[in-house]
Amino acid sequence: MSASVKNLILFATVFAMIPLIAQFQGWNAALFVLNMGLISAIMALGVNLQWGFAGLFNVGIMGFVALGGLAAVLVGMPVTQGAWQAGGFGIVASLFLGALTIGIAIIAAGRMAKGWTRSLVVFGILVVGFLIYRGLFDPSVEAVEAIEPALTGYLGGLGLPVILAWPVGGLLAAGAAWIIGKTALGLRSDYLAIATLGIAEIIIAILKNEDWLSRGVKNVVGVPRPVPYEINLQNDPVFVERAAGFGVDAVTASTIYVKLLYCGLFAFVLVLLLWLAQQALNSPWGRMMRAIRDNEVAAEAMGKDVTARHLQVFILGSAICGIAGAMMTTLDGQLTPGTYQPLRFTFLVWVMVIVGGSGNNLGAVLGGLLIYLMWDQGETIGLQVMEWITAGLPDGSAVKAHLIASAAHMRLLTIGVLLLLVLRFSPRGLIPER
């Protein structure tokens, strides 16, 4: 069997599961799984650029995804009335002052001779700058968060079309990746993993605690959409008439129609990014990246700037994760910092890349679709399996109650078994690198 036929069969098998889900759970559930699978495939594509192309072990994926989600809020949400006048400009000024303090301290440390004098001067600059910064920052934050805290209590966004947040999310993630890369890319792979994970946790902590920026754990709801709202479609006589012509009620038709529009947008972005990734893979730049991945010492001996190339691919992969994060927040319609968990946004994405095939862009896409589908359906199927196994036990049985309550963990078992099977029978992934 040729590789093309094998790949076609693998993708056809995955997409054939969507109508199967629709048969038992309805098209709303099936299309939601498909949309999340497309977003997961984009995340896996970004990680594959970093690991498959360059061998960079990044476990801070959730931080870049969260920055993408923040972009959806900063771009799409309307400005909170009176927030900027109350304290928004003070917050910006204090942040600028904090950055200026650090810059002055760095300049002073660079121009003065080593010794106690330099240490005292740098320490004094930092202490004075910090006190001034807090004196301006704290009252400004309190003023912003006091504005209708049950509904807003934050600065809001720019009120622009939310689809613009997708590239902006990529830019935010790319900027954070540049800062992280300049700091951590000189570290050995295991230390790079620790550094990226720690920085991602810092990003999540900021989103959870800085209410003036993202409402923290109170969440931002009502993020605008790039597609129509269901209620508007249900009140449109033309749409209702067309839905009736297909024998579907307006409520069901509107939800399916909206999810199909999302599916089209996500598929377009995925295909575009996949095409760009394939162009990069087959270019001289892509061949150079794989050469650096396989033997850094030899590549450096040939005159290649290994650190600079690593920084490039780290920024590109992180930007793609940021785009996926903005898309996911747009689909959810809300920013919930508490849901950015390593299991979902880091290790699950790594499983997608490993199962699909590290170093192969098509493999990463296949892994993203397959693993999210299995992750989403694992609990549902697990519950049905547990109910079938315990059908003969009495209702008050402690064993029956325990097994049914444990059905939620079946998704972990499913992913683990699938990973083990792939590593046993196809250790380089379902679609391995050539």
Image: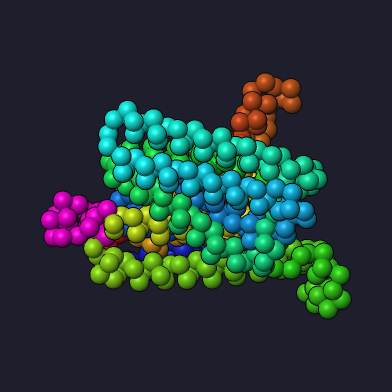
Q: Position of residue 324 (x, y in %)?
A: 53, 58
Front residue of this view, candidates 417 and 386: 417
Is 228 situated left or right of 283 in this image?
A: right
Is 413 situated left or right of 387 in this image?
A: left
Question: Would residue 28 be counted in the magenta stretch?
Answer: no
- Identify the residue shown where x is 57% and y is 38%: 132
Which stretch is magenta? 289-307
Q: Position of residue 163 (x, y in %)?
A: 62, 66
- Identify the residue shown where x is 66% and y is 52%: 89
Rendered view: 415 above or below 224: above
Quarter that holds the N terminus: bottom left
Number of callouts: 0
Front residue of this view, candidates 316 and 253: 316
Question: Would residue 294 be counted in the magenta stretch?
Answer: yes
* Quadrant of the image occupied by residue 222: bottom right
Quarter that holds the C terminus: bottom left
Rendered view: 61 above or below 261: above
- Identify the residue shown where x is 49% and y is 33%: 127
* Quadrant of the image occupied by residue 259: bottom right
- Identify the residue shown where x is 35% and y is 49%: 182
